[in-house]
Amino acid sequence: MDKASPPGSNIEQTSAASADRTADTASMDTARHAQPVHKPHAVVIGSGFGGLAAAVRLGVRGFRVTVLERLSEPGGRARVFRQDGFTFDAGPTIITAPFLLEELWQLAGRRLADDIELVPMDPFYRIRFDDGSHFDYNGDAQAMRDEVAKFSPQDVPGYDRFVALTERIFRIGFEQLGHVSFGRFSDMLKILPDLLKLQGYRSVYGLVSRYIQHDKLRQVFSFHPLLVGGNPFTTTSIYTLISYLERHWGVHFVNGGTGRLVSGLVELIHSQGNQVRCSAEVGQIITREGAATGVELANGEHIAADLVVSNADVGWTYGKLLSRSRRQRWSDGKLKRTKFSMSLFVWYFGTAKRYEDVPHHMIMLGPRYRELLRDIFDHKVLAEDFSLYLHRPTATDPSLAPPGCDAFYVLSPVPNLAAGIDWQTRAEPYRRAIEQYLSETVLPDLPAQVISSRFITPDYFHDELLSVQGAAFGPEPVLQQSAWFRPHNRSEDVRNLYIVGAGTHPGAGVPGVISSARVLDQVVPDAHTFTHVDV
């Protein structure tokens, strides 16, 4: 296999990733069955997990559904890159709360296990510190106590109390409120007593620090907000529910890559007689008398609809797809004041050899924790050091790389585009610095072993995924931008417009965006109540 061209020469070149999927994409552009025209028509903008899950649920409830995807293949952030015999999941790699997926398959009359193989991870992650020590994080209670004791035996009782609290937070924050629409401020007032009781006014790091004293253990049990775009030092402690969610259901990998979930959901939509149209960019949402009545594509095509669901970036939906005259709460000023999440630099690479000692998931914490996060979120500077998430899917599924090779991606949280960083000039030096660090730590001789390479920067999130400020996760999950304060699942500004995905309640992450589609069952009227709009 020839060594790939220099990574800087293929920055965010996505066309090559879809070249070998032309036939599959074409099949997604037409429904498998005829669609009865008497059904009310729902248009879904975007085919990320939120949009695909929404389409399945609407199809079950009797709607005729058309999913419109701007890119040449479905998936949004969960699309797939393929090159040089390697398969790279572009975005999500971790599956938790698998019951949400099982429910979608059941609603469509299928079994998830018949289409998707979920492989439990053990450990969930290896968390490696800059000095080479590590913590193997999993769901076994005694194994976790033993790992805590390795670093600080006196912290074990505090750890147990912390786990008990995260279970209470999970029971309320996820099981009771994760699928509830916060359409009225009174909905927020109802949960305030629970928020106070569960110390939701604290940050994740602040809550962890009340129970655990050792600095490294505080990092281990506070990093989870980074998985959904949040700063552990400012994200509401309600997000500690992620750690219990993982403990409760485990962490899984999809054999074949997360892209298998995308194709599986598309198949469910097709089996309902509905369609996914790729290379169909929405230019605007059409409204009449204060209600969404369809969309206009960038090529001028009009598609009438009885309701519109946007899985596009929420800032883009309100700032670009809707006329200013139709926006009251989400005015330009409100959007400008919104605090968006950090972005990501992700390097995808394949190696000519296998690194058998590297686990499937590894989080590599750098020499600074609080200070690095301050640089990313507050100072908005590209620091010389970094913390990394290293993903080696071929540890579980060797078929994602040629025989004897490994597929990787390494992710580094970086400031969003509000920082003004020129990624055209900074990207390749940053990639080389990460490559050198990996070579000196867990992937020896890496520069000589790389045979396939590509990377994405915040420019990719802005230019390809149409994300405001190139933010990777939408609005940052601080308390003032959570629940009722987050953009609502039912638009406050336009009737018959609904929002799913990372930017609405309950938030980012695969469980969050799939749950946002679940909320639609509460706020979208039954299909028979809609008056059909002729297409």
Image (cartoon, rainbow, N blue to C red):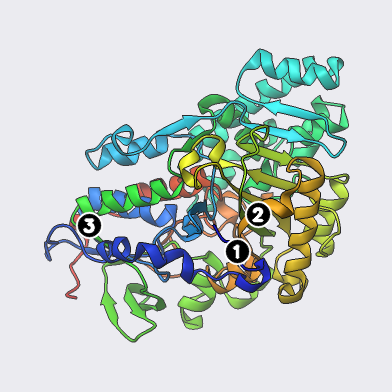
Indicate which disc, 2 or 3, sits on the residue closer to the N terminus.
3
Q: What residue type is labelled 1?
A: Ala
Q: Nearer the viewer, mark 1 or mark 3?
A: 1
Front one among 149 and 443: 443
- Residue 56 location in percent, x, y? 30, 50
Callout 2: 10 Å neighbours few (<14), some, many (20+)?
some
Q: In the image, 466: left or right of 163?
A: left
Q: In the image, 272: left or right of 135?
A: left
Indicate which disc, 2 or 1, sits on the residue closer to the N terminus.
1
* Disc assigned to residue 450: 2
Callout 1: 10 Å neighbours few (<14), some, many (20+)?
some
Q: In this view, does 448 lie above or below 195?
A: below
Q: Callout 3: helix, strand or loop?
A: loop
The residue that mark 3 highlights is: 63
Q: How far apart are marks 2 and 1 (CA)?
A: 8 Å
Question: Residue at image x 84%, y 15%?
Answer: 153
The residue that mark 1 highlights is: 4
> Mark 2 touching mark 1, by CB under 8 A?
yes
